[in-house]
Amino acid sequence: MPQRPQPFTRSPFRDGAFDAGVVCLGVGKEEDSTQTHELRQEQEARETREHKLLGRSELADEAEQHERRRDKAAYLAEKLAEREEAESE
């Protein structure tokens, strides 16, 4: 039965050399990029939905709430786009 790598009890760098047997960098990078892309699309859809609801709002409080939600979704979509770009580099 193969032994499983043990969690770090010390630095992943051993005597200046990277111990690749315990940590693999870049594993799942494509999956992370796909997840980021999907999250960004979700935020863009949320921004669009809140913009439509803002236009239909009858009360000032309701309109302010939709405006805040729209702005938050736009901010998150922007940050996710930046993250997606950084992951593709």
Image (tube, rainbow, N blue to C red):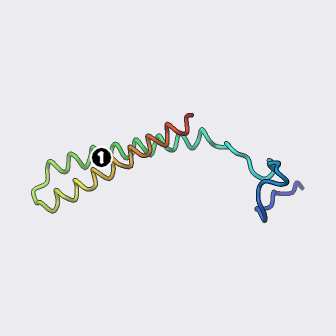
Give neighbour class at mark 1: few <14, some 14-19, many 20+ (Cα, 10 Å). Answer: many
Q: Residue furthest front?
A: 16
Please, what is the three-letter code of the amino acid marked with disc 1? Glu
Q: Is residue 65 left or right of residue 73?
A: left
Residue 25: percent from left, percent from top: 70, 45
Q: Is residue 83 left or right of residue 54?
A: right
Q: Nearer the viewer, residue 56 or 79?
A: 79
Looking at the image, which residue is at 13% across and 54% down? 57
Looking at the image, which residue is at 85% across and 53% down? 15
At numbered mark 1, what does the secondary structure look like: helix, strand or loop?
A: helix
Q: Nearer the viewer, residue 74 or 53?
A: 74
Residue 89: percent from left, percent from top: 57, 34
Quarter of the image for residue 4 reads: bottom right
Q: Is residue 19 above or below residue 31?
A: below
The quadrant in which the N terminus is found is bottom right
Q: Residue furthest left?
A: 58
Q: Nearer the viewer, residue 57 or 85?
A: 85
Looking at the image, which residue is at 33% across and 50% down? 73
Counting the numbered discs, the total is: 1
Looking at the image, which residue is at 22% across and 55% down? 66
Q: Is residue 84 left or right of residue 69?
A: right
Q: Residue furthest bottom?
A: 9
Q: Residue furthest right?
A: 1
Residue 50: percent from left, percent from top: 25, 49
Q: Which residue is mark 1?
A: 47
Q: Is residue 60 left or right of residue 12?
A: left
Residue 70: percent from left, percent from top: 27, 50
